[in-house]
Image (spheres, rainbow, N blue to C red):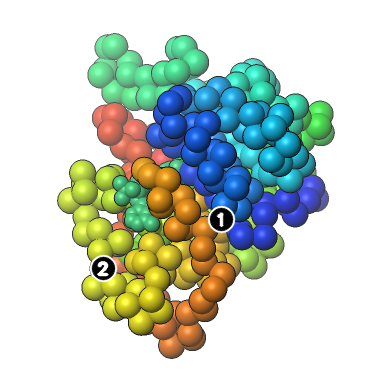
Amino acid sequence: MSSSPSLSNQGTNKIGFGCYGVTESQANEWIREAIITGYRHFDCAFLYQNESAIGKGLRKCINQGLIRREEIFITSKLPMNGMDPTRVNYFLTKTLENLDCDYLDLYLIHAPFCVKYITDNQFYPVNPESGRLDIDHTTNLNETWKSMEQVVDSGLVRSIGLSNFNENQMIDLMASCEIKPSIVQNETHVYFQQKSLRNFCHQNDIIYQSFAPLGSAKSAAINGHDLVIEDATINQLAVKYQVSNSQICLRWHQQSNITPIVGFDSLQHIRENIKLNHFTLSTDDLAIISQLDRNERIFYFDKVPGTRSHRYYPF
Ligand SMILES: NC(=O)c1ccc[n+]([C@@H]2O[C@H](COP(=O)([O-])OP(=O)(O)OC[C@H]3O[C@@H](n4cnc5c(N)ncnc54)[C@H](OP(=O)(O)O)[C@@H]3O)[C@@H](O)[C@H]2O)c1
C-alpha cells in the first residue's frame, strides 16, 4: 500500500481557504486577496456549485503573474451522486473544466453515503414513492476508492483522501486499498475535538484537516448550538494574547497538528485569519482549550429523511 504523492505545496501557513458559499461576484476579489495575504490552499467541491467562479478567480491571479499554479494547492470533492465507480472520472473531468485546471492536488470523497445519480446537481435525491433519500444500494466504497486510485494513476490528481468517514470505514478501506488516503477532512472545532479520529490519522501518517474550524456560526445557530467563536474561555485567551477569538481557535488547530479549512463572509476576516504565526499558545492554554471539548457535532447531513438509515451513514 503506497501513499499518494507530495503534499508540499499546501503553503507554509497550513491553512485552507474554504470556498463554500463564495459567490460569482465575490470570487475574483476574495481569491486575489487570499493569494496576496498568503493563502495557498483552496478547498473546493463540485457540490458547492461555484467551481467555475473559483476557477476564474484563480486563473486571473495566475495570468496576472501573482502566483504560479504549482505554488497553490487545489482540493475538490467527489459528490455523493458520483460514487458509482464509473462516474468518478466523469465528475472529476467536470471539476477540472470548471476550475480550469489540468490536475488537482487533492480529490476527496465528500461523504461515504452514495445516492442515486439523477442529474449532476441532485446531491440528496428523494425517491418519489417513499419520500426518502434515493440511496444507491449497489456501490461499494472499496470499488469507488479503486476509481479514485485510477485518477491518481492517470495523473489528473496528485493525492486522494476522504471526508466525513468514520474510523471503521477508514480501517475497512485501508485493508484493501493500493493507495492509502493522504488526507482526511472532517468537522472539528474546540467543541468537537475528534481526539480519537485525529490520533488514528496521525498514527497512520494521514494528514488531518478540519472543516468548520470556527464552529460554523451560521450552521450552529440554525441548529441551536452555542457559538464556538463566542466561548467565554476563548474570549479570555483572545484578550490575553491580544488577538481575535478566531485567531485563538485557528492557532489551536495548527498547534494540534490540524490543517483548518476556514470559511469567510468578509475581506476583513480573510486578512485576519491568516495572521497566526506571531503568537504561540502555551502548553497550559492548549490544555485549557482541550477541556472545552463537548463532543458536539454540528454537521449531520441528515436533512433528507432516510439518510441516517443508509448503510454507510457515518455518524
Ligand atoms: N467536507 C465537508 O463536508 C465540509 C462541510 C462544511 C464545510 N467544509 C469546508 O470548510 C469550510 C469552512 O466551513 P464553514 O464556513 O462552515 O465553517 P467555519 O470556518 O467554522 O465558519 C465560517 C464562518 O466564521 C465566520 N468567521 C470567519 N472568520 C472570522 C473572524 N475572523 N471573526 C469572526 N467570525 C469569523 C464567518 O462568518 P461571519 O464573517 O459572518 O462572522 C464565516 O461564515 C467551507 O468553506 C468548506 O470549504 C467542508
Residue 127 falls left or right of residue 182: left
Q: Residue 129 is drawn in which quadrant? A: top left
Residue assigned mark 1: 15
Per the image, label 1 sits on a secondary structure element best described as loop
From the viewer's side, name the closer residue of 37 and 252: 37
Residue 167 x, y percent position in the rendering: 52, 55
Residue 57 falls left or right of residue 295: right
Q: Disc 1, ligand 1: is the CB inside 8 Å?
A: no
> How many residues crowd mark 2 within 10 Å: few (<14), some (14–19), many (20+)?
some
> How many residues crowd mark 1 within 10 Å: few (<14), some (14–19), many (20+)?
many
Image point 60% across, 45% down: which residue?
Answer: 35
Image point 41% across, 40% down: which residue?
Answer: 313
- Three-letter amino acid code at the position of disc 1: Ile
> Which of pointers 1 and 2 lies earlier in the amino acid sequence?
1
Per the image, label 2 sits on a secondary structure element best described as loop
Among all residues in the image, which is located at the extreme left? 224
**Mark drawn on residue 231:** 2
Image point 56% across, 55% down: which residue?
Answer: 15
Residue 140 x, y percent position in the rendering: 58, 32
Residue 76 x, y percent position in the rendering: 59, 35
**Mark drawn on residue 230:** none
Residue 310 x, y percent position in the rendering: 39, 34
Residue 187 falls left or right of residue 163: left
88 vs 181: above or below: above
Q: Residue 258 is drawn in which quadrant? A: bottom right
- Three-letter amino acid code at the position of disc 2: Asp
Spatial separation of the CA atoms under disc 1 and disc 2: 22 Å
110 vs 217: above or below: above
From the viewer's side, name the closer residue of 181 and 43: 43
Instruction: Determine whether label 1 and label 2 are within 8 Å by CB.
Output: no
Image point 45% across, 25% down: which residue?
Answer: 24
